[in-house]
Amino acid sequence: MDIKVNAETSLPRWLNFSFVLIPLFIVIGIVNTSSTQECGENGILDVDRKTQLTVNCDGSAFEGKGVGSASSINYIALGQQVYSGAAACAGCHGVNGGGGVGPAFTGGELYTTFPTCSDHALWIELGSAGWQAEIGPAYGAENKVSIGGMPGFAGKLTEDEIYAVVVFERVVFGGETLTKYSKTVDF
């Protein structure tokens, strides 16, 4: 009695195919989600390494001041500084506002959630826990249920810094015009 045993083992073709496709998709995903941006992309400005001031891409002084006197605060520059630095907004919402752990600000998402600056600023001040305690479980124009995670910045950021972040997010990521904003209007 001769019993033939097939000593060759092979994987199904679909499994072999997946061993090629899955790493390929991972590489493509990493390349496409790279968060490095050049100066000028999505409204991102440059920062002079010596002075730590926000400048235009060509190195000239950035003049994006809010509406008002010549001594008014440069809300875009201050907002970018707070967004990328002290408040670490970029860590959750992405350096280009495209989202991540936190929601995206691009593609109209910001205005769908917060049509007014005052609600947007109040959300930043209170955060999800403060909003739930003072306002209720839902936030924004669509009454999204807050599941937590957004820190409150009242007492950590000044009123001007909170306003600057609101202006920065709405102008740079949302596409609104800077001339719409003055400290006395829509806040």
Image (spheres, rainbow, N blue to C red):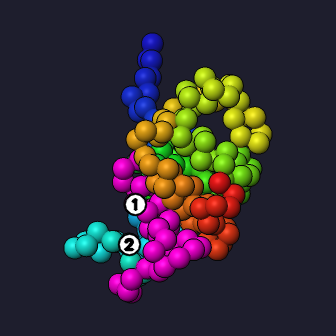
Q: Going by the picture, which residue comes out furthest to the top?
A: 1
Three-letter residue code for mark 1 = Gln
Residue 176, quarter of the rendered image: bottom right
Three-letter residue code for mark 2 = Thr
Mark earlier in primary sequence (2, 1): 2
In the image, residue 76 lies in the stretch drawn in magenta:
yes
State how far apart marks 2 and 1 are (Cα).
8 Å
Whole-percent x, y for residue 77 in the image: 44, 67
Q: Nearer the viewer, residue 53 or 47?
A: 53
In the image, residue 179 lies in the stretch drawn in magenta:
no
Q: Which residues are magenta?
A: 58-87
- Quick check: 15 above or below 132? below
Q: Which residue is mark 1?
A: 81
SS under mark 2: strand
Quarter of the rendering occupied by the C terminus: bottom right
Residue 116 in view, yes or no: yes
Q: Which mark is residue 54?
A: 2
- Disc 2: CA contacts within 10 A as few (<14), some (14-19) or many (>=20): many
